[in-house]
């Protein structure tokens, strides 16, 4: 039997009372794409962070081509030609592509022309359309991920660990990434692809390891399995079947009304142009489109974080156009942001402190001039239980939770404290099947509670499953507003690509 390229044997890792990995043994060969599949919190990322030197195993050994090795830091991992692309990019936005790639890897006087030429050659070699002289802040999310990959290629890595690499990409960017992974492995390199998306696994992997609760529950070749079997191995709890959303006649009152909303950049170029729509009580209003076409700006304008140049916003017949974020919250607006780390939580705060953030000014928490800690603790534990958050208790720090459980806390907080209207901006981005089902159930329950919901998503399946009506965005404009029954994947795809309503039909 051939000696594996890299091998982990009997790896265990503990965080206080939590078992992250227990007796994990796995290997990867040269030329192989190994998928590490599992729900959030299954131990996939922890296991790979041990291989990359970010964490140290409490038990177990690591081998390269049969020889035992010790990896105490990412620097040592890079010495063994291991590189890891994590969910959250480690790029300096003010620096160029070249500066980011050579940062920490080149000493002494730098010949910038030579370095830019070398990096540009590398981008061309792998078919990456990235300008080595551009600043990171001017790149799309997909291009930024290519820069992260180029950092690994620049160091001549031959084992590439990719942690949920498609979480922030558009469908087109995902296709490009998959082609790169296949090409990279064909060149004799190895890839470990961490994901919870079954379609991606069946597309790119040659072998699949399924993890659950820190333990390996399956190790199968792709051609000997299917999506149904993998989902059974991956999920220990039953996925509830969601009721099909039916179109309604919109006889209910309008809750949110947006008229002629226009937002301009400093140079005067519109980010949003003449946006108008109404959302009724008991309606889920979907916003579809490729990421970066004005959806983020729309959410921020409605919640009060971005000032509009023209237009008006009304919530329950109250003009909120010029009101502060605090006033909008007091009027009952809820907001689940797309970037939970930047806008949704403070990672070094406990869960109860993060719950308090939403309504810290409210008299509900005051007791003799101090915070009513017991009431806050009880409310947080109630959210933990109601939304099935995997956390020891209200005192847990937000950063100790997996991404899916962090998202459940945010959804729980916003749902519990919002009034008649709530925005869900990319609510399931980067989540596993179980967490996605949990969030979808929460959204549908709010619809049943007669709340008006704005759902922003780049996942068409999510839009079709949940929405009553859909507005398709392209370059800051609405291409059309439709009932979901009037749309199919082909038609919505054309609209998202810039075709007008008449052209798409």
Image (cartoon, rainbow, N blue to C red):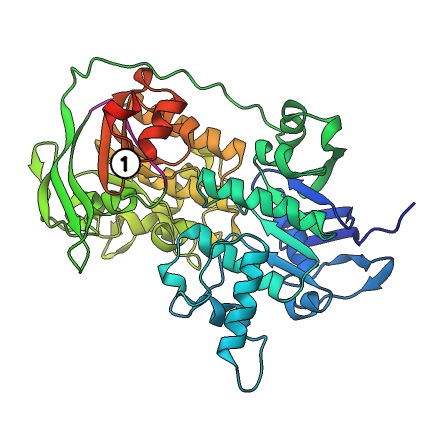
Along the viewing direction, whichever of 493 and 409 lies nearer the viewer: 493
Q: Residues within 10 Å of mark 1 (few under 14, many from 20)?
A: many
> Left or right: 186 with respect to 194?
right
Q: Is residue 390 visible?
A: no
Along the viewing direction, whichever of 373 and 60 lies nearer the viewer: 60
Q: Range of the magenta residues?
A: 280-290
At a point 38% along the width and 49% down the height, the residue shown is 339
Q: Position of residue 258 (x, y in %)?
A: 14, 35
Tell me the element at label 1: strand
Q: Position of residue 143 (x, y in %)?
A: 45, 54
Q: Position of residue 100 (x, y in %)?
A: 49, 69
At a point 65% along the width and 70% down the height, the residue shown is 75
**Furthest residue in direction right, as rendered:** 1
Along the viewing direction, whichever of 463 and 99 lies nearer the viewer: 99
Q: Is residue 203 visible?
A: yes
Image quadrant for the N terminus?
Answer: top right
According to the picture, the residue beneath numbered tag 1 turns out to be 473
As for residue 501 lying within the magenta part, the answer is no
Q: Is residue 71 above or below residue 14?
A: below
At a point 35% along the width and 26% down the height, the residue shown is 492
Q: Is residue 69 above or below residue 234?
A: below
Instruction: Identify the image quadrant of residue 70.
Output: bottom right
As for residue 288 lying within the magenta part, the answer is yes
> Left or right: 463 with respect to 261?
right
Image quadrant for the C terminus?
Answer: top left
Q: Is residue 177 above or below residue 77?
A: above
> Left or right: 181 with respect to 295?
right
Q: Is residue 245 above or below residue 349?
A: above
Q: Position of residue 489 (x, y in %)?
A: 40, 24
């Amino acid at each position: 039997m051939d000696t594996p390229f890299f091998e982990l044997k009997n790896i265990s890792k503990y965080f206080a009372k939590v078992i992250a990995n227990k007796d994990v043994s796995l290997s990867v060969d040269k030329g192989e794409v190994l998928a590490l599949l599992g729900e959030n919190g299954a131990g996939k990322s922890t296991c790979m962070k041990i291989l990359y030197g970010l964490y140290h195993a409490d038990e177990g050994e690591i081998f390269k081509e049969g020889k035992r090795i010790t990896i105490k830091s990412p620097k040592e991992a890079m010495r063994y030609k291991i590189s890891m692309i994590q969910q959250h990019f480690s790029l300096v936005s003010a620096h160029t592509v070249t500066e980011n790639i050579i940062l920490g890897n080149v000493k002494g006087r730098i010949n910038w022309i030579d370095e830019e030429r070398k990096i540009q050659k590398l981008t061309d070699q792998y078919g990456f359309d990235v300008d080595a002289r551009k600043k990171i802040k001017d790149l799309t999310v997909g291009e930024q991920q290519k820069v992260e990959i180029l950092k690994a290629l620049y160091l001549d890595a031959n084992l590439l660990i990719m942690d949920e690499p498609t979480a922030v990409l558009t469908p087109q960017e995902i296709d490009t990434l998959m082609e790169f992974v296949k090409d990279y492995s064909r060149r004799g390199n190895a890839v470990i692809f961490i994901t919870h998306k079954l379609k991606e696994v069946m597309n790119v992997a040659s072998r699949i390891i399924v993890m659950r609760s820190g333990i390996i529950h399956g190790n199968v070749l792709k051609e000997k399995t299917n999506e149904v079997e993998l989902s059974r191995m991956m999920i220990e709890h039953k996925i509830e079947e969601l009721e099909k959303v039916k179109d309604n006649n919109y006889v209910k009152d309008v809750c949110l009304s947006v008229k002629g909303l226009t937002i301009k950049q400093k140079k005067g170029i519109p980010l949003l142009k003449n946006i108008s729509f109404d959302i009724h009580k008991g309606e889920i209003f979907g916003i579809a489109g490729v990421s970066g076409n004005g959806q983020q700006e729309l959410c921020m304008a409605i919640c009060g974080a971005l000032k509009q140049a023209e237009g008006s916003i009304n919530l329950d017949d109250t003009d909120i156009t010029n009101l502060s974020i605090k006033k909008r919250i007091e009027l009952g607006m809820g907001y689940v942001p797309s970037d939970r780390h930047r806008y949704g939580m403070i990672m070094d705060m406990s869960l109860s402190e993060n719950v308090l953030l939403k309504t810290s000014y409210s008299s509900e928490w005051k007791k003799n001039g101090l915070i009513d800690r017991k009431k806050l603790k009880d409310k947080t534990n109630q959210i933990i239980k109601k939304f099935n958050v995997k956390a020891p208790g209200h005192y847990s720090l937000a950063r100790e939770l997996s991404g899916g459980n962090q998202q459940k806390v945010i959804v729980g907080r916003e749902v519990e404290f919002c009034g008649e209207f709530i925005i869900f901006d990319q609510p399931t981005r980067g989540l596993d099947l179980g967490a996605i089902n949990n969030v979808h159930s929460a959204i549908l329950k709010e619809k049943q509670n007669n709340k008006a919901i704005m759902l922003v998503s780049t996942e068409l399946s999510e839009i079709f499953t949940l929405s009553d009506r859909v507005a398709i965005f392209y370059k800051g404009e609405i291409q059309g507003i439709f009932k979901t029954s009037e749309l199919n994947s082909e038609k919505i795809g054309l609209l998202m690509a810039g075709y007008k309503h008449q052209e798409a039909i």
